């Protein structure tokens, strides 16, 4: 019997408090894994995470503080092409 199992296999928090979520899709035959594929998505500070898995929501609630949201916004603003110094 074939079955498909989708799980969250990894949750990581990066330097700028971006939460990376890796989902694994496993195809099993009689309980024996035949294949596995991965999908990764990121949740940035300030982004809505209400549709995420409860475990992911808990981590986002912990790391996406008001301070981290402001720090991330400042980082993005400083990284925009308009703020880059031209090298001649």
Image (cartoon, helix red, strand yellow):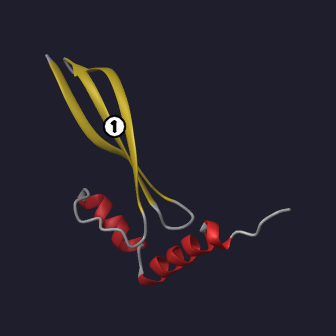
Quarter of image, res 59: bottom left
**Disc count in the image?**
1
Quarter of image, res 52: bottom left
Q: Is residue 54 left or right of residue 9?
A: left
Question: Which of these two is toward me, 77 or 49?
Answer: 77
Residue 76 in picture, x, y percent from top left: 55, 70
Q: Is residue 79 left or right of residue 59?
A: right
For the point 41% across and 79% down, the residue is 65
Q: In this view, which residue lies farthest toward the right?
A: 88
Vertical position of residue 32 compared to residue 84: above or below: above
Residue 45 in picture, x, y percent from top left: 42, 70
Question: Which of these two is toward me, 75 or 50?
Answer: 75
For the point 22% across and 60% down, the residue is 51
Quarter of the image with the N terminus is: top left
Quarter of image, res 75: bottom right
Give the labeled residue for mark 1. Answer: 24
For the point 32% across and 59% down, the residue is 56
Q: In this view, which residue lies farthest toward the front?
A: 88
Quarter of the image with the C terminus is: bottom right
Residue 15 in picture, x, y percent from top left: 57, 64
Mark 1 packing: few (<14 Cα in 10 Å), some, or many (20+)? some
Circle 1 SS class: strand
For the point 38% across and 73% down, the residue is 46
Vertical position of residue 82 compared to residue 56: above or below: below
Residue 67 in picture, x, y percent from top left: 48, 83
Q: Is residue 45 left or right of residue 33?
A: right
């Amino acid at each position: 019997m074939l079955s498909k199992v989708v799980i969250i296999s990894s949750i990581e928090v990066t330097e700028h408090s971006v939460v990376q979520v890796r989902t694994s899709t496993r195809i099993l035959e009689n309980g024996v894994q035949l294949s596995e594929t991965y999908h990764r998505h990121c949740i940035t500070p300030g982004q809505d995470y209400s549709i995420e898995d409860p475990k992911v929501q808990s981590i986002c609630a912990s790391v996406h503080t008001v301070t981290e949201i402001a720090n991330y916004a400042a980082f993005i603003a400083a990284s925009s092409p308009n703020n880059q110094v031209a090298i001649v």
